[in-house]
Each structure stands twice: as structure tokens, then as C-alpha cells.
């Protein structure tokens, strides 16, 4: 093994960038003790982001300086920096573009955009390959996994290092537009399309109020739920959420009331609440629209969750590809704190609760709750074996309630109007409303709020329908399943989708018509899971590679009978033995496509 020691020194700019996060380096300071080093390690990702934002990459000198300041072994710091796709360990231009080629963007012609960019700007850097692309060698652009702008596909994210640095994501990407933004041009702003049926509970303020104004938020019902929660007290708040049968909207569908109650009763202190805003599931963008359009609602909902669970501190882990959401949420947190709605005495009622916003760095696996905790703590985003569960030992080893954005914002309506009013729409098994991210070959892609039990066909009608014949619909994202055009009468509820052998997942509804070739889509899904596997467990690390190889053989005309038999064994092994949901669901969409859409395993 070739051991390399980081003796490089940071540049003046790199030192300044890190010192803004960690404070100035004290001269002749005593050695950092174990407890202090452990407590400060949580600043590792913010320090790496500071380097990346200031100079455009993480150099050996910058990494060495961060390691020394935080008393983290250089090998460990390198392991963390190389884990995340948005950190580059090789020098690259200050202006850099990430161009999405994932499922929705692929269906919208992203491959053509990338081909034009290659002609205009040169070859793409290796952007998201675990085998070396995490260092993004050369070039001013790279292909990227889903950027969460699926309704505006194809999409791009352009970052510009400097002081100040800047980031902008945009849809409707063309080679000319990407090149223009790289040179400093501004992309056109597109207002997210939202719609629905029945009551708008989650989207009631999106595209209606100024998302930067706390006064407008309060004028439209903001902070009424927190005021009532304080009046009710923690036990009654949890009772209402439990009675409403609210379950997680991120895909796992675990009862929210049970989770909050378990944390509230946990004897170990302190407690934490965490918002999982790292929606990296291809085809998902509802949480982005909520945060960009109604950031104060998330701040209020987190405060309600803190009150209910006995937590005095919360963290929002926001995916790194959402620059506007970061700006809006940062502003909302600062405004709420300045007005006494966060801090030591919330609303003057003696409630202590404050929020910290953390930025992800491009790792789908960090959507898994324990991997997210590891990332906040300053480690590689690798899932932990459960039990213990987060309600017992979560963030920093303490009882933690973790929910996604949609789930948290849904609690505001429940607390404000009561469980009975919340359950007045939906089905008996799935009360309330649900957000769906409709994209692909529909006329009006966007976020739609509908009561549970609405049919898939009715949802597509809301989105304007399609211009051509539907070939397939991906429900739940890359970890979901494909359904056929014959299933448009499927009711979108937890109980009905389970009966149909599919899933609601994170709310993805990606429509493919007869102009889209299925094999490239399936191969892109397989490549996504191969790249995004953290590599910690053998079933997932090896299985995702074998899945991609199998698809290649099938598409090249291999014996369908033999390959499908092997695929069934592979899928079962991954479901049974993978540590987390990534490996357990990595074959779901492809398996459903091969059994429902590709007779005989070939087309």
C-alpha cells in the first residue's frame, strides 16, 4: 500500500475560507482533546463546502488544513471528501456545470444536450462515477444524476467559485444556455407549476405569498399551528398527529405519531428533530417546491416537532443541488430567529428551540436516515445497522425524530384544524392529501396535491394528459416500480398500490410515451444505483454492478430465460441481505419493467 501524507500547505484564500467556518487558528494552542475533536467533527462538511465554494475544488493543502484544524486524520478527511459527488479533489475551472442525464432528463433529450456540449466545450469531466469520477478530472462540465428539476427537464446546475460564490440551477437546459451561464449569463426563471384537486393544504401558500416575507406568511395563517401547539402541549399534539394516521411521505410510510411519541418518552437527553430534505430520488422535486415557495412553513413545522418531542435543537439536511431552496430557507430561519420565533424563548412562551441548516454534497444514499446522521456528524454517508433505531440512538447517538419536508408540513394542518378535519378527505386507510411529482411526457409537469384515492388517470388529466400513446409510468422513482397504461384506474393510496404490487414511494409519477426507448431508461436506472451504492455491504456493492451487466446482456440479445432466472436470484439476495433500502429496492423498477413491459425479457 502506498501511504501518502498531507504535508501541503493551504493557499491564503483556502485558509481564509476555512477560518470563516472554524474561526481563526489560534497560535500555540494546546492539542485538541478527544471530546473537543469529536464535537467539532460535525463541521467537516461545512469546511469542505467552504473550500469548494472559494476556489472551486478541494486541494491537498486545503484538505490538510481542515484535517489539522479539526483533528481529523487526513485519511479519514480524504475518505469523506471523496465520498460526495459535489466535491472535486482535482483542480477544475471556477465555473463548472453539472448537466443532468438521469431518467426524466434522458427522456427529455439530455443526451443530445450533452453531445452538443461535448462539441462546444470539450469532453465531460467524470462527474458521478464511484470508480474515480468523484474527483471530476478536467473539463468545465460533467454529467450529473437527478438535479430535482424533473418537471423542467433537461436541467443543469452551474457553480461559480469565488468571494462571493454563486450557484444556479435551471431547467430547459440547452448547450447554448449552459455555455452562456458558465460565462456569467442568467438563465430564465420558471415559476414551478402546482395544481391539484380538492383542498390545498400543503401547497396553499406556494406561488401565492412572497416566500421571503415573514409578515406575508403570518397574514396567510402562518404560526397559528405553533401557537395552538403551545396551548395544547406535547401530549395532545402527538395524540392529534397519531389520530390523523399521518405516515411518512418520503417512501417508508412509518407512522409519524408513533415516532414522535417514542422520542418524547426516551429518557436519554438531549433529543433532536431532523428534517430530511435530501430528496435525491430521481423524479422527485416536491420538497424543493415546498421549500422554495413556503420556507417558513418548514421552520414552523420543525418548531412544532421540537415542542412535541422535547427537542431543543433541530437540523435541516438540504441537498446540495438546491441553491434557491438554501437561500430561501436560510433567510426564513434568520427572520424567524430575529422575531423571537426561534431561540431561547419562542413566542415568549418559554419554549426553547433553534434550527441549524446543513448542506448535502451529492450523495443519494444520504436520503437514508442513518446515512444522513453520519453525514451531519462529519463522516461518510454510510447507513448503520438497525436496531438501534433513530428514536433510540439517532443523531450524535441521541433519540431523534426524523421526517421529510412534506410530512412535517402536513402536521401544521393537523394541529391547526384537528385530526378529524384532516381525515375528511382521502381514504380510510390513507387519510389526507398527497403531493405527486408529475414529469416526463405530460403537457404540464409539476407538483400536484390530491386526496389519497385519486386515480392515476385523473392525476394525469390534471397534468394535461399526453400527446402520444403512453408506454409506461414509473411510480415512486428509481426505487419504485413501472406500471402499464392499462393501470390508469389505479387508486393512489397506500392500500391500493400495495394490492397492485407497486408503491407510492416518494410521489414520483414519471410518464414515458412511445417515443422513448425503454432499454436506455433501464440502463440509466441501473447505472444510477451502481454509482450511488455506498459500497459498504457486498450484496449492494456487487449486486448493483451485476444488475447493470445483466441488463446489457439482455439488451444485446442474450437468452431471456436464463438471464431472468439469474435476475430473480440476484434481486432476492439484494432484498434479503443489503443493509439499507438502497440495496433492497435497487432492482424493483427494473424487475417490474422486465415482468410487465418487456415480454420474454427483450424488446
Image (cartoon, rainbow, N blue to C red):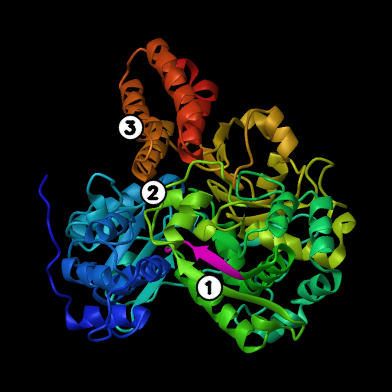
Horizontal side, residue 54 vs residue 421: left or right: left
**Residue 356 got which mark?**
1
Please give the range of residues in magenta. 313-320
Residue at mark 2 to residue at mark 1: CA–CA distance: 38 Å
Q: Position of residue 466 (x, y in %)?
A: 59, 44
Q: Position of residue 388 (x, y in %)?
A: 56, 45
Tag 2 and tag 3, C-beta contact below 8 Å = no
| Residue 279 is covered by the magenta coloring | no
Horizontal side, residue 306 vs residue 442: left or right: right
Q: Where is residue 505, by image quadrant?
A: top right
| Residue 318 is covered by the magenta coloring | yes
User: Of circles 2 and 3, which is in front?
Assistant: 3
Query: Is the residue marked by circle 2 packed among few (<14), some (14-19), or many (20+) residues within 10 Å?
Result: some
The kind of secondary structure element at disc 1 is strand
- List the residue tagged with mark 3: 545
User: Of circles 2 and 1, which is in front?
Assistant: 1
Asked whether residue 202 is in view, the answer is no
Q: Mark 1 or mark 3, which is nearer the start of the sequence?
A: 1
Residue drawn 33% across and 47% down?
111
Q: Position of residue 168 (x, y in %)?
A: 40, 71
Relative to 564, residue 487 above or below? below
Q: Where is residue 232, by image quadrant?
A: bottom right
- List the residue tagged with mark 2: 109
Tag 2 and tag 1, C-beta contact below 8 Å = no
Residue drawn 49% across and 23% down?
572
Horizontal side, residue 170 vs residue 228: left or right: left
Amino acid at each position: 500500500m502506498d501511504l501518502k501524507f498531507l504535508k501541503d500547505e493551504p493557499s491564503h484564500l483556502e485558509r481564509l475560507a476555512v477560518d470563516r467556518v472554524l474561526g481563526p487558528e489560534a497560535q500555540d494552542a494546546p492539542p485538541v482533546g478527544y471530546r473537543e475533536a469529536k464535537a467539532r467533527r460535525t463541521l467537516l462538511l461545512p469546511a469542505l463546502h467552504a473550500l469548494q465554494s472559494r476556489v472551486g475544488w478541494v486541494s491537498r493543502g486545503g484538505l490538510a488544513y481542515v484535517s489539522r484544524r479539526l483533528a481529523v486524520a487526513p485519511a479519514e478527511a480524504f475518505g469523506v471528501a471523496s465520498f460526495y459527488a459535489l466535491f472535486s479533489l482535482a483542480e477544475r475551472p471556477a465555473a463548472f456545470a453539472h448537466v443532468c442525464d438521469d431518467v426524466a432528463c434522458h427522456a427529455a433529450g439530455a443526451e443530445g444536450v450533452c453531445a452538443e456540449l461535448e462539441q462546444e466545450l470539450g469532453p465531460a469531466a467524470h462527474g458521478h462515477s464511484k470508480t474515480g469520477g468523484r474527483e471530476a478530472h478536467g473539463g468545465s462540465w460533467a454529467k450529473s444524476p437527478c438535479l430535482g428539476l424533473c418537471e423542467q427537464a433537461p436541467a443543469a446546475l452551474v457553480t461559480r467559485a469565488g468571494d462571493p460564490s454563486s450557484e444556479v440551477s435551471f431547467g430547459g437546459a440547452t448547450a447554448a444556455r449552459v455555455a452562456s451561464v458558465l460565462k456569467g449569463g442568467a438563465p430564465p426563471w420558471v415559476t414551478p407549476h402546482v395544481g391539484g384537486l380538492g383542498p390545498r393544504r400543503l401547497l396553499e401558500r406556494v406561488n401565492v405569498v412572497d416566500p421571503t416575507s415573514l409578515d406575508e406568511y403570518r397574514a396567510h395563517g402562518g404560526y397559528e399551528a405553533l401557537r395552538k401547539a403551545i396551548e395544547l402541549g406535547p401530549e395532545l399534539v402527538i395524540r392529534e398527529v397519531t389520530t390523523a394516521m399521518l405516515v411518512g411521505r418520503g417512501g417508508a410510510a412509518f407512522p409519524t405519531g408513533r415516532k414522535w411519541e417514542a422520542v418524547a418518552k426516551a429518557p436519554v437527553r438531549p433529543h433532536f428533530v431532523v428534517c430530511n430534505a435530501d430528496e435525491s430520488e430521481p423524479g422527485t422535486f416536491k420538497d424543493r417546491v415546498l421549500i422554495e415557495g413556503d420556507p417558513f412553513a418548514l421552520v414552523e413545522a420543525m418548531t412544532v416537532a421540537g415542542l412535541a418531542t422535547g427537542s431543543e435543537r433541530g437540523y435541516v439536511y438540504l441537498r446540495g443541488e438546491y441553491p434557491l431552496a438554501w437561500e430561501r430557507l436560510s433567510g426564513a430561519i434568520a427572520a424567524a430567529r430575529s422575531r423571537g420565533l426561534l431561540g431561547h424563548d419562542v413566542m415568549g412562551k418559554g419554549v426553547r428551540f433553534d434550527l441549524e441548516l446543513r448542506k448535502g454534497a451529492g450523495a443519494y444514499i444520504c436520503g437514508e436516515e442513518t446515512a444522513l446522521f453520519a453525514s451531519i456528524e462529519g463522516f461518510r454517508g454510510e447507513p448503520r445497522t438497525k436496531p438501534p433505531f433513530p428514536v433510540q440512538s439517532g443523531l450524535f447517538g441521541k433519540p431523534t425524530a426524523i421526517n421529510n419536508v412534506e410530512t412535517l408540513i402536513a402536521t401544521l394542518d393537523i394541529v391547526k384544524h384537528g385530526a378529524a378535519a384532516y381525515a375528511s378527505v382521502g381514504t380510510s386507510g390513507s387519510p389526507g392529501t398527497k403531493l405527486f411529482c408529475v414529469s416526463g411526457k405530460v403537457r404540464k409537469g409539476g407538483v400536484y396535491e390530491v386526496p389519497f384515492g385519486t386515480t392515476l388517470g385523473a392525476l394525469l388529466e390534471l397534468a394535461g394528459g399526453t400527446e402520444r400513446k403512453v408506454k409506461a409510468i414509473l411510480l415512486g422513482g428509481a426505487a419504485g416500480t413501472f406500471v402499464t397504461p392499462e393501470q390508469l384506474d389505479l387508486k393512489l393510496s397506500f392500500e391500493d398500490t400495495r394490492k397492485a404490487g407497486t408503491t407510492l414511494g416518494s410521489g414520483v409519477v414519471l410518464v414515458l410515451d412511445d417515443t422513448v426507448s425503454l432499454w436506455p431508461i433501464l440502463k440509466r436506472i441501473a447505472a444510477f444505483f451502481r454509482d450511488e451504492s455506498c459500497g459498504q455491504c457486498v450484496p449492494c456493492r456487487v449486486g448493483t454492478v451485476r444488475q447493470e451487466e445483466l441488463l446489457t446482456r439482455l439488451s444485446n440479445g442474450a437468452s431471456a430465460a436464463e438471464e431472468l432466472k439469474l435476475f430473480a436470484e440476484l434481486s432476492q439476495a439484494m432484498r434479503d441481505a443489503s443493509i439499507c433500502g438502497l440495496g433492497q429496492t435497487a432492482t424493483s423498477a427494473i424487475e417490474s419493467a422486465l415482468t410487465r413491459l418487456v415480454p420474454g425479457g427483450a424488446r
